[in-house]
Image (cartoon, grey):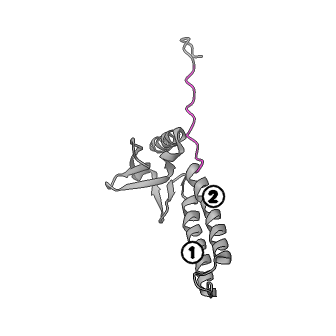
Amino acid sequence: MTSEGAPDPQPVSAPSREPFRSRRGRLMATVMAVVSIVLFALLAVLVSGVDEGGWVVADRVMMAVIGVGLALVLWRWAAVRAVPDDTGLNVHNLIGQRHIAWDEIEDVTFDDGDPWVSLHLKDTETVAVMAIQRADGPSSRAEAQRLADLVAASRHQP
């Protein structure tokens, strides 16, 4: 307590710098990648052709390649994340990745109906942060607020 009898101000804790990841989207993409590989492998082995000749080896290989290709796209979806560090935010979306410096970020929005968080940059560009998805329910709001708090805290650093 201070000499005037008021309580000492509590230090404000810094927001967590844990990576942002979608929970439901990541789980669904991982499960579906496994299902894709298993299903297309079974199809390649078990399905016989319409005519008596059955599938040729090239057909079976192509079926397996399709399953693996689909699994790779789903794996990429599962790898979506945003990783904060001292200098900014590394955003790894479905297609591509980008490092955005904290001082480039003007605003963080997560409006009703938006599928994921958006970063509005000072150069008027908008960048989606697919790692914070509405599909995660109420926790997505908390994660959006944590990101906004990280951006605000970066403005107060010396």
Identify residue type, mark 1.
Answer: Ile
Residue found 54% across the figure and 58% down from its top: 80
Which SS class for mark 1? Answer: helix
Q: Position of residue 131 (x, y in %)?
A: 52, 52
Q: Can you see residue 158?
A: no
Report the magenta residues as a range.
8-21
Q: Can you see residue 25?
A: yes
Tag 2: Cα neighbours inside 10 Å, few (<14), some, or many (≥20)?
Answer: some
Examine the rendered structure and indicate whether residue 41 appears above or below residue 33: below
> In which quarter of the view is residue 72 placed?
bottom right
Identify residue type, mark 2.
Answer: Val
Q: Where is residue 135 in the image (x, y as percent from the top left)?
A: 51, 46
In the displayed orientation, state which residue is furthest to the front: 52
Task: Count the numbered circles shown.
Answer: 2
| Disc number for residue 66 | 1
Residue nearest the viewer, comparing 59 with 146:
59
Q: Name the residue under label 2.
A: 31
Magenta-drawn stretch contains 10: yes
> In which quarter of the view is residue 32 placed?
bottom right
Task: Work out which quarter of the rendered image holds the N terminus and state it.
Answer: top right
Residue found 31% across the figure and 54% down from its top: 124
